[in-house]
Image: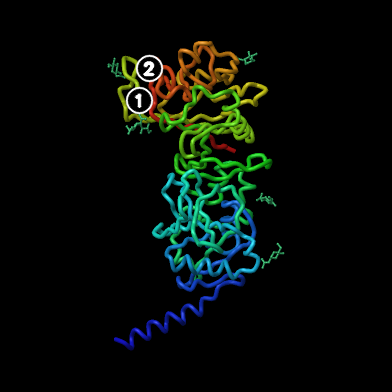
């Protein structure tokens, strides 16, 4: 028995010594076949992960699965030339999927953490380590520039659970500077819903929430209501222009300038609307508090601010949320209006109807930015499916995806 054990451990040593890390990479003292690479250059989280992926097959921002590994990774960072100028290092942790539910980008289980006091800050989504100092972790804005630590496994992909962003054949320059919308991230192998950085016109990146699962994924979410925590109906023209949210994964308006840019950079863009739950009561209500409705249209775009963000849509649609003339159909060709800048809306749309910023005339057959709980039903946050059913949804989502 003793002999067998010795043999086993001998063969383990032999295996490790055969699996040498590539030049510049450092072998893990804790996990057989795992190598790390500390990069003393500042990049945003997405670009850092893409840099890892492009450097070696199966490489990603590192996961850290134990206190031993945390210690090991930080020792390697400490002994890396140039890294002394780095304060924080990006590692692979993030909560893109659901706020507060952290995960590793390589798909390994989230089993060990070393949060600093007061962390994680759930208003941020990407995890960094203060490797050279306390070895503790915190969340930061994914768009911050940090040094970073890549991982890879020697001897094929067997040790690496493949999910989401790791499961790609990497394209050489998968950097957020090249991603113009969520569909581009999808094309580069991102299959997880969450927050990504995009740069639609090459003039600067911003973060968006990408739906990578609905109807093939690749959707850039530009409107979401999940509850009444953030008021929409009393937001100004300027608020709608630049956008507002209480977390990109929560209640969200991406901003009319962004929506204009994203809906006009390609010649044909799809619009998808999803609605959940009817809170309305009375003769027009669906009596379906757990209902789900959706629709999808092509040729969606909104004009620029000089043209009052006028709405354009194909009259044809798929899905069960609408009938012609109802829902968002009514808004086709209307200007955007807010309580403080009216471009063709009847005054009563704002008070008493509380419809908020939307493409309004006299007034609308839907207003997904209306007051969450309106003063009277079939006003505020509402949507008419046809001439006899109008709902006050419990949740809504609007998103776009280029067709060409
Ligand atoms: C250290 O930093 C300098 C200047 O940024 C760079 O030229 C050099 O390649 C770096 N060395 C290493 C080992 O990263
Ligand atoms: C991505 O952007 C970089 C510059 O930011 C450029 O050099 C590279 O060619 C681009 N790659 C693709 C595939 O467009
Ligand atoms: C929305 O509907 C869900 C499921 O019916 C329910 O749990 C939730 O409380 C509702 N939220 C609001 C704000 O009405
Ligand atoms: C919902 O219930 C009301 C009665 O409370 C009724 O008048 C209405 O027709 C019902 N709606 C549907 C779609 O059945
Ligand atoms: C609308 O369609 C979806 C999927 O096609 C379905 O799950 C949903 O129940 C439908 N809604 C209603 C109210 O019939
Ligand atoms: C859009 O707004 C402009 C300026 O307020 C107005 O001249 C034009 O008639 C409006 N268009 C529609 C369709 O209401």
Name the residue rendered at 60%, 35% in the picture: 262
Name the residue rendered at 46%, 62% in the picture: 64
Q: Residues within 10 Å of mark 2 (few under 14, many from 20)?
A: some
The location of residue 354, given as percent across then percent down, is 47, 17
Res. 12 image quadrant: bottom left
Q: On screen, 350 above or below 7?
A: above
Q: Nearer the viewer, mark 1 or mark 2?
A: 2
| Residue 167 visible, this angle | no
Q: On screen, 325 above or below 136?
A: above
Please report whichever mark, 1 or 2, sits nearer to the chain's N-terminal start.
1
Furthest-bottom residue in this view: 3
Res. 379 image quadrant: top left
Residues at circles 1 and 2 in contact by the CB criterion of under 8 Å: no
Q: Nearer the viewer, residue 155 or 100?
A: 100
The location of residue 281, given as percent across then percent down, is 32, 19
| Residue 2 visible, this angle | yes
Quarter of the C terminus within the rendering: top right
Label 2 SS: loop
The location of residue 83, given as percent across then percent down, is 62, 64
Name the residue rendered at 45%, 22% in the picture: 371
Q: Nearer the viewer, residue 397 or 371?
A: 371
Q: On screen, 74 above or below 388?
A: below
228 with respect to 26 (left or right): left
The chosen color scheme is rainbow
The location of residue 62, given as percent across then percent down, is 51, 61
Between the C-alphas of marks 1 and 2, the distance is: 11 Å
Q: Residues within 10 Å of mark 1 (few under 14, many from 20)?
A: many
Mark 2 lies on residue? 377
Ligand 5 within 8 Å, label 1 CB: no
Q: Which numbered disc covers residue 278?
A: 1
Name the residue rendered at 42%, 82% in the picture: 11
Label 1 SS: strand
């Amino acid at each position: 028995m003793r002999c067998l054990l010795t043999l086993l451990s001998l063969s383990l040593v032999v295996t490790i010594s055969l699996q040498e890390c590539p030049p510049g990479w450092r072998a893990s003292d804790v996990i057989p076949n795992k190598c790390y690479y500390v990069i003393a250059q500042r990049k945003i989280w997405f670009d850092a992960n893409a840099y890892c992926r492009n450097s070696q097959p199966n490489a990603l921002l590192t996961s850290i699965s134990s206190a031993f590994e945390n210690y090991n990774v930080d020792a390697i960072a400490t002994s890396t030339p140039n890294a002394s100028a780095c304060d924080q290092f990006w590692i692979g942790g993030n909560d893109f999927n659901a706020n507060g539910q952290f995960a590793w980008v390589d798909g390994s289980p989230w089993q060990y953490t070393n949060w600093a006091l007061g962390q994680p800050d759930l208003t941020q989504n990407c995890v960094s380590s203060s490797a050279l100092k306390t070895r503790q972790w915190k969340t930061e804005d994914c768009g911050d520039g940090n040094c970073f630590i890549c991982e890879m496994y020697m001897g094929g992909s067997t040790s690496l659970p493949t999910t989401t962003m790791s499961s790609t054949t990497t394209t050489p320059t998968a950097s957020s500077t090249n991603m113009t919308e969520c569909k581009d991230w999808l094309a580069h192998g991102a299959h997880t819903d969450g927050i990504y950085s995009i740069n639609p016109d090459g003039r600067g990146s911003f973060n968006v929430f990408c739906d990578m699962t609905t109807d093939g994924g690749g959707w850039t979410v530009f409107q979401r209501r999940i509850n009444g925590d953030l008021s929409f109906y009393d937001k100004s023209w300027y608020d709608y222009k630049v956008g507002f949210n209480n977390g990109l994964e929560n209640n969200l308006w991406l901003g009319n300038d962004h929506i204009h840019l994203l809906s006009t950079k390609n010649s044909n863009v799809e619009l998808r609307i999803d609605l959940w739950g009817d809170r309305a009561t009375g003769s027009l209500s669906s009596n379906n508090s757990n209902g789900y409705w959706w629709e999808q249209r092509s040729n969606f775009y909104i004009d620029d601010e000089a043209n009052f963000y006028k709405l354009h849509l194909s009259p044809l649609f798929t899905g069960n949320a609408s009938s012609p003339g109802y829902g968002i159909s009514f808004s086709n060709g209307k200007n955007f209006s807010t309580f403080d800048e009216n471009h063709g809306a009847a005054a009563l749309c704002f008070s008493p109807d509380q419809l908020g910023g939307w493409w309004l005339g006299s007034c609308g057959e839907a207003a997904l930015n209306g007051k969450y709980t309106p003063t009277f039903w079939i006003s505020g946050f509402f949507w008419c499916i046809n001439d006899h059913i109008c709902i006050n949804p419990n949740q809504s989502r609007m998103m776009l995806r280029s067709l060409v």
